[in-house]
Structures are given as C-alpha cells and as structure tokens.
Amino acid sequence: MLDMKLLRSHRLWLVSAASMQLALLAVALSIPNAHGAERSSKARGDIQAKLDYCKDCHGRSAQGFHGYFPIPRLAGQQPEYLKNQLQAFIEHRRTNNIMFNVAHSLSPAMIDALAADFRELNPPPLGGGPRRLVSTGEKIFQNGVPEANVAACAACHGPEAQGSGEIPRLAGQLSDYTFNKLVNWSKERGQHPTEPDISAVMSPVAHSLTRPQVEAIAAYLSYLK
Amino acid sequence: MGRIIHTTNAVATKIVALAVLLLIASAFASHAESAMVRNCTWCHGGSAQGYSPAPRLAGQRATYIYQQLASFAFHTRDAPFSKQYMWGAAANLSPAAAHALSVYFSNLPPRAANDGNRELVARGEVIYQRGMSEENIAACVACHGPNAEGIGSIPRIGGLDYTYLRRRLEQWAEGYHGSLEHPMPHIATQLSRDQIEELASYLSFVR
C-alpha cells in the first residue's frame, strides 16, 4: 500500500519532471526564434532607413540627382558593380570623400541588401544631355572609334548599356556624371598604388576619347532606358 | 527780427530735409525695380543682408529665389512667417517681376551673419562636410557645395543668420512644408536638436 503510494507519487514526479523538461525545451527553442524574428525585422528596418538615406542624395527612385556635384543614378545598377565600388571607396582605390564616409559604415550584409534593392528600381532616365549629340554618341557607343583604337562600349556594357556583373549599367546615367568620370578616370579610379583593379580596363579607352566624343556618349546614355 | 530768423531757419531746415529726401529718392530711382526692391528691403534689410526673421537675399541663387516666390504665391511654403509676410508679398508678383527681383538680389554681394555659437562650429562643419553615415545623415556638401554656395535651385546657405537656419531645419519636423518634398524634409528630420544648432552655427560663419 505504502509502496503503491510511493510509486504513484514517484510517477507523478516523473511526469511533472518530464513536462517541465518539455516546457523548458519549448522555452529554450522559442527564445532564439523570437529573437531571430525581432532581429530580422530590425534588420529590415535598418536597411529601409539606410535606403532612405542613400536616396536623400541619389534621388527618391535612385534616378540620380543634380546637386552641387552630379550624383549618379543607382537604379537598375549591377549589384556586383555596386559592391565593388563601395569596397573601392573604403580601400581608397576610388577617391571620393563623401562616399568613403558612407561606405565605411556599411556591413557586408547591408551592402548586399542595398545592392539588391537598387537593382529592382527602374525609374525613367533623367536625361539632360544635349539632344543634338545623341546620334553621334550612339554611333560611338555601338561601334567604337576604330581610327583611335577605341572598342565599342557595347562590347562590354551590352548593346543596351545594361552592364553585367562587375561591368556597370550605363543606361540612364546623368550625362554630367558620365562626362566627369570619363575625363577624370585615371585620377579617380584605380588609386591604390599596389593593388590595380578592374577600373584599369577603362583607362586606355578614357584616355583615347576626345572631350566632344565623351560628351556625345554621355548625352546618348542619359536618355537610354 | 527774431521771427524772421526763426522763419528763415525753418525754411532752411525744410530745404535741407527736402534735399536729403530727393537724394535718397534718386538713389532708389537709379534702380529700375526701385519700388519693388524697396518692398523687399523693408524687411530683408537695406542691402538685403537679412534682418531676422527675414533671411538675407543678397547673393542668393536666382533660381532658388524665384522658386520660393512661387511657393509663397501658391501657398506650398507654409511656416508662420511665410504665411504672415510672404504669401501676401508674393501674391501679386507677375512672373516677370519675380524673375527681375530674383536676378537683382542674386547679384548683390552677400555678407556672413557670423552670429552662431563659435563653440559648435567644428562639430557643425563635420556634419556639413562629411555627414554622419552611422546615423543616416547625408553630407550637406554634396548638394549645397564646399562653401555652402548652392547652385541653381539649391540655395546658398553659407552665412545666413543662425536663427533662420535653425528654424528652417526645425520646421520640417514640426510639420511645415518648404517648396520641396524631397530630400530636405527627410534629411532635416534625421537631425537632432543639437545637430541642428551645430549646423546653423557653422553655416552662419561660412562666407
């Protein structure tokens, strides 16, 4: 009798111990889940806040903006190119004080997320280059300048200037931005003394083009969708 | 005898006063837009250097002034002083008159107000020139230029008076509107009260 009582209470204890363990397990499992959800929604909030910050300068749809300096279009840009450039600012391979400050506070995860978001945007181009230069620009872009040994831009950037991988999309870029970059290429890009980067590919091209040719290419690209 | 001297004195005083008035009038008349300009300078100061709360217009970007006049006329810029003074002032301006005034004031040489807190200048300069990327605060220099000189429709903000700068930056968060929906309303609401005071202090000394 006594044994039965003892046995029952022992069983009770076992059951309650087991349910306690289950409960503990459930709590233990649920803690990281709750944290994870909270963390990911916070991360999404952080990304949205950072995206809004980017758009303060690059335009509401990342279509670019004419500030004191021309601020480039990021909409539809190749993610790999964007990531590369942000890294180039951090490593001083590409010189730009403002973007150095912007880039060095971004985590790799944040950069991935921002690049993916910009890729999805597709606002109409701002335009702005002289219309009369568009057809000349198109010719150079599609065929190059054979007599100056300049290859067709389309060969790498694509016939619609959409870019690919590390090679940037140029379609819809601000004409004064494209112009400034091309005429200052070797002063702004590939600035690390011991680590040459992919920007070296463009150096001879930028060097061989005349200013009127650069102006024409920039005008053509500024209207391209 | 005494009365004659007195009368002569009175006449002389009147003549002098009249001469002074004529001189002033002719100085104003030398400007084509004299009457219109005078309507502005009553509040914005004789050489348009600003007279708080009316901001300096001298050296301001012509396109910016023109757009602001339009935003007052169409009631998009709606802070209390805008409503009280500028809605009425801009209501009857023709586009040609607004254009003439904008060009006139943009060509006057600006002087810096120099009235901010000097102890906050260094911190304000960092925000202006570099931004605060960790706090998602954009660098002002990208649009307003290295000397806060502005360009086109982007205003010159270097050397404006401290109170005006501070109030403009505060007003977006208070729900008032400027002439733009983007990007200043967002940028301004990212700034803390301290950061606004630092920026306004720095800018008041920029020439």
Image (tube, helix red, strand yellow):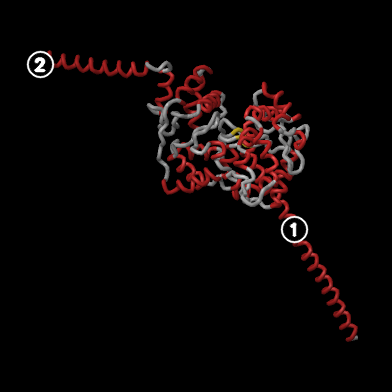
In the rendered structure, the answer to whether residue A60 lies left or right of residue A23 reads: left
B69 shown above or below A89: above
Q: Chain of mark 1?
A: A
Quadrant of the frame with the C terminus of chain B: top left
- At mark 1, the secondary structure is helix
Residue beneath the point at 42% across and 16% down? B32
Quadrant of the frame with the N terminus of chain B: top left
Evaluate whether residue B127 shows in this view. yes
Evaluate whether residue A59 shows in this view. no
Task: Check residue B151 in the rendering and tell me which mark sits there, or answer none.
Answer: none
* Whole-percent x, y for residue B57 in the image: 45, 29
Amino acid type, label 1: Ala
Task: Give whichever of B193, A151 is nearer the camera.
Answer: A151
Foreground mark, 1 or 2, reads 1
Q: For residue B8, which quarter of the picture?
A: top left
Q: Residue furthest bottom?
A: A2
B32 shown above or below A188: above
- Name the residue tied to disc 2: B2
- Name the residue tied to disc 1: A34
